Image (tube, helix red, strand yellow):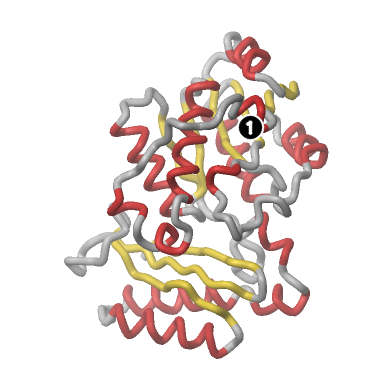
Amino acid sequence: MQIHHTIESLRAARASAGKAALVPTMGNLHEGHITLMRQAGERADCVIASIFVNRLQFGPREDFDSYPRTLAADCEKLEAAGVAHVFAPNETVMYPEPQSYHVDPAPAQISILEGEFRPGHFRGVATVVLKLLNIVQPDIALFGKKDYQQLMVLSNMVRQLGIPVEVLPGETVRAADGLALSSRNGYLSAEERSEAPRLHRQLARIADAVRGGDHDFLKLETDAMAELAAHGWQPDYIAVRRRADLQPPIHCSDPLVVLGAAKLGRTRLIDNLEV
């Protein structure tokens, strides 16, 4: 496995890589990331993982400075997973001058759910991902479904801008008790870690109810948020939405997804389940 810290080095390696799959990450890797790497390896001759903590997608009171940087440990995991190249640039490489050009996704897609509580987040995500796609020029790019709204925004960006890359979604990987794996789970105390699966249980309860014919979505959402709050959570949202655009359902036959975000202590967790 080769580790590249410059664009020139990565592009030189990419030139002879054949069909390439890119898996963008911010590092501090867990089994969910590694599952994406393995999935990428099944679809391409060469897997390229990027590791870059992107300042543009963090809000002013978010955890950019404290976000774990674990490059050495990450590279060991990536090599074991069969990754051929790691692109690990620093900020000077990615942003050699102030980034004055940005991708502004459609307001209807980023003013809701995560976008409501993290203004500017998807602008930063879309900008860095477009830049990574331009640098690497992969045939395939993989993104996890745990960040469901992010997957929608990036898929739409690729389609509307005519970027020649196939976007593949990766299923959410969970611990045995249902907690979606996340780099931020490491912030949880032991007591919080025991409590954390409650978010998934509430989403599962809603999904089961909807499958059973309960379409009083507002009551389902409100009850779930109240249950979380009663156990010390600070819920941002629980929402049943259309999978296609994450807008409220119009027809009961629409393919749906239930999404949630809530803070437990100082850790903000997100999750979703397709219905």
Most foreground residue, 178 or 246: 246
- Residue 139 as seen in the image, left or right of residue 47: left
Q: Is residue 144 above or below residue 20?
A: below
Q: How many marks?
A: 1
Give the image location of residue 65, x and y in percent. 71, 51
| Residue at the extreme bottom of the image, as rendered | 230
What residue sits right under mark 1 in the picture?
49
The residue positioned 82% from the left and 37% from the top of the image is 72
Residue type for callout 1: Ala
Most foreground residue, 45 or 163: 163
Dot 1 crowding, Cα within 10 Å, few <14, some 14–19, many 20+: many
Q: Is residue 196 above or below residue 86?
A: below
For mark 1, give the secondary structure.
strand
| Residue at the extreme left of the image, as rendered | 251
Give the image location of residue 59, x and y in percent. 55, 54
Give the image location of residue 152, x and y in percent. 38, 47
The residue positioned 70% from the left and 46% from the top of the image is 29
